[in-house]
């Protein structure tokens, strides 16, 4: 594959709201590095990169550039602005023109309901790079594969992890044998993501493992990633050290589905990071498993440089905790918060995610969870439930939702509270949220 050029595209977000909470196209950049190992030249157009922001805060999160666009027809009655988040389309076209003509274009995708931004990118690639094969992959492409095949305009849709399947497909298209087709199960064999292509390296996303030992009914991790696999903790610490020393990166966001599980891996990771003496900050925008946090873990997290802590509580109702997968109990949550506070964390900085609008859920349950979190001194963070195909809750979500979520992924948008009902209305949600904002 020597001499081949591949263009990676991280498309826009089309949504009612979006804020950059350390959102980086980690999967796409790992694939870019795999293709480099195969001799390809790799170029990146990141709609959500430096040119896609109006304001970046120190620490690597910030405001995306926003332009209001017409709502897709099916969302016409939603009384909110709809916008394209990320770089101006003119800049996107200019970037396509400036890049060397590629032998293939790879487009990634994240949330299922963000597909219009993906389609827009593919349309522009088709207009400006006629004849170049376009391959689509990522979370939307995996969760809504048929929808993507039918409507995206891509030549090929690859589902699930692409480390092996992508070089094999490109090999077929180009009539060449790829030299490097790593298994996505052997995480220590994978190269570092090609973050060097990003024009502002203000934060790096990292994973110490993939998958999760739990199988929560509302979560698609099992379908997307398979069972849990772990990286060698020393290799993770070395990677962090590499970005810190070679590129001066101070902020890192962990994208793990289950960073703190199992305990011995987590302790080894924290100790390996501390040993590197790096002066870095870690952010965990994806919820952590509170069950694993005790006096020892909390102390090590503090020493290692963990600053943004979000715990995945979801609900304080013991029945719901058990029936959705049993990942945490109220007592374990209390112990986690107490341990974090003893380790020196400011209670207001300990966020706890609370799921709102699960199929059949009563608003009272979310209100109780808010009170429970506040009683521990932590900060409730509401998360509107997004129904996800291939999860165990999906059939119930389809039955409960007033929207046709089975045929139209736009209705998975969490902003709509897609499984709202008389027992949990949008007004209930707004009222709970207002209550938090006024405190
Ligand atoms: C990290 C993460 C986040 C980060 C942001 C990530 C980002 N880049 O923007 C944060 C914490 C901010 C976040 C927020 C949310 N998230 Co989230 N998140 C994840 C998580 C845990 C990992 C995604 C990831 O980056 N993986 C890392 C890389 C290695 O994998 P990857 O990108 O998928 O890439 C691989 C493959 O997909 C494929 N691939 C990728 N691109 C391409 C391209 C080609 C051409 C090919 C061939 C292959 C390919 O190969 C790659 C390598 O193997 C997933 C769960 C999961 N396990 O996927 C949920 C997940 C995507 N999130 C989800 C949800 C629900 C949310 C929230 C709505 C939660 C909420 N209610 O607030 C918010 C919404 C954010 C918003 N702004 O609206 C859902 C999806 C919902 C949906 N309908 O699509 C998921 C699946 C979790 C779940 N509950 O099941 N999230």
Image (spheres, rainbow, N blue to C red):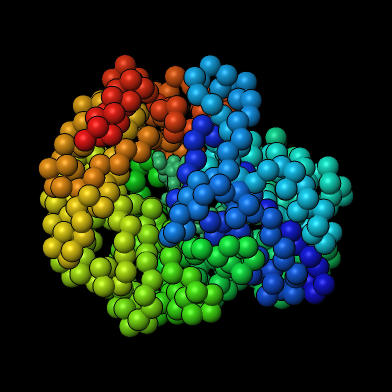
Q: Is residue 372 left or right of residue 223?
A: left
287 to 207, vertically: above or below: above
163 to 214, vertically: above or below: below
Where residue 66 appears, x then y in whole percent? 58, 38
| Residue at image point 68% right, 75% down | 37
Where residue 82 appears, x then y in whole percent? 56, 29
| Residue at image point 71% right, 42% down | 89
Q: Quadrant of the N terminus?
A: bottom right
User: On the image, which quarter does residue 176 sit in?
Assistant: bottom right
Residue toward you, 183 or 275: 275
272 to 46, vertically: above or below: below
| Residue at image point 43% right, 65% down | 251
User: On the image, which quarter does residue 104 sit in?
Assistant: bottom right
Where residue 36 appears, x then y in whole percent? 69, 72
Q: Is residue 29 left or right of residue 333?
A: right
Q: How many marks?
A: 0
Note whether residue 362 is visible.
yes
Q: Is residue 215 left or right of residue 168?
A: left
């Amino acid at each position: 594959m020597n001499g081949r050029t591949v263009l990676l595209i991280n498309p826009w977000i089309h949504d009612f709201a979006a804020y950059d909470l350390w959102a980086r196209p980690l999967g796409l950049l790992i694939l870019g590095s795999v293709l480099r190992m195969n001799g390809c030249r790799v170029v990146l157009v990141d709609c959500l990169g430096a040119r896609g922001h109006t304001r970046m805060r120190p620490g690597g999160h910030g405001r995306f550039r926003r332009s209001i666009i017409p709502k897709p027809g099916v969302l016409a009655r939603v009384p909110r602005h709809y916008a394209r988040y990320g770089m101006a389309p003119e800049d996107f076209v200019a970037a396509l023109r400036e890049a060397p003509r590629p032998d293939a274009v790879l487009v990634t995708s994240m949330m299922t309901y963000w597909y219009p931004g993906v389609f827009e990118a593919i349309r522009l690639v088709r207009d400006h790079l006629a004849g170049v094969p376009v391959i689509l992959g990522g979370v939307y492409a995996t969760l809504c594969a048929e929808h993507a095949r039918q409507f995206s305009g891509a030549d090929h849709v690859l589902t699930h992890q692409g480390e092996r399947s992508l070089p094999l497909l490109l090999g077929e298209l180009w009539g060449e044998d790829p030299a490097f087709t790593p298994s996505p199960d052997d995480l220590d064999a994978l190269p570092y993501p090609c973050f060097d292509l990003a024009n502002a390296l203000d934060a790096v996303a990292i994973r110490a493992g993939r998958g999760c030992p739990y199988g929560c009914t509302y979560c698609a991790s099992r379908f997307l990633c398979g069972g849990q696999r772990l990286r060698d903790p020393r290799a993770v610490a070395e990677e962090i050290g590499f970005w810190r020393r070679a590129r001066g990166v101070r902020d890192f966001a962990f994208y793990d589905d289950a960073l703190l599980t199992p305990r011995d891996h987590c302790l080894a990771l924290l100790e390996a990071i501390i040993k590197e003496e790096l002066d870095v900050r870690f952010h965990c925008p994806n919820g952590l498993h509170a069950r694993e946090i005790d006096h020892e873990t909390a102390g090590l997290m503090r020493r290692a440089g963990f600053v943004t802590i979000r715990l995945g509580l979801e609900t304080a109702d013991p029945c719901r905790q058990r029936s959705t997968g049993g990942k945490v109990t109220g007592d374990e949550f209390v112990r986690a918060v107490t341990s974090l506070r003893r380790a020196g964390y400011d209670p207001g900085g300990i966020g706890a995610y609370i799921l709102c609008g699960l199929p059949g859920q009563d608003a009272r349950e979310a209100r109780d969870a808010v009170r429970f979190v506040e009683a521990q001194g932590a900060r409730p963070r509401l998360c509107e439930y997004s129904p996800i195909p291939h999860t165990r809750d999906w059939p119930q979500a389809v039955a409960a939702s007033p929207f046709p979520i089975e045929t139209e992924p736009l209705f998975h948008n969490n902003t709509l509270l897609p499984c709202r009902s008389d027992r949990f209305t949008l007004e209930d949600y707004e009222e709970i949220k207002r209550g938090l904002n006024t405190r």
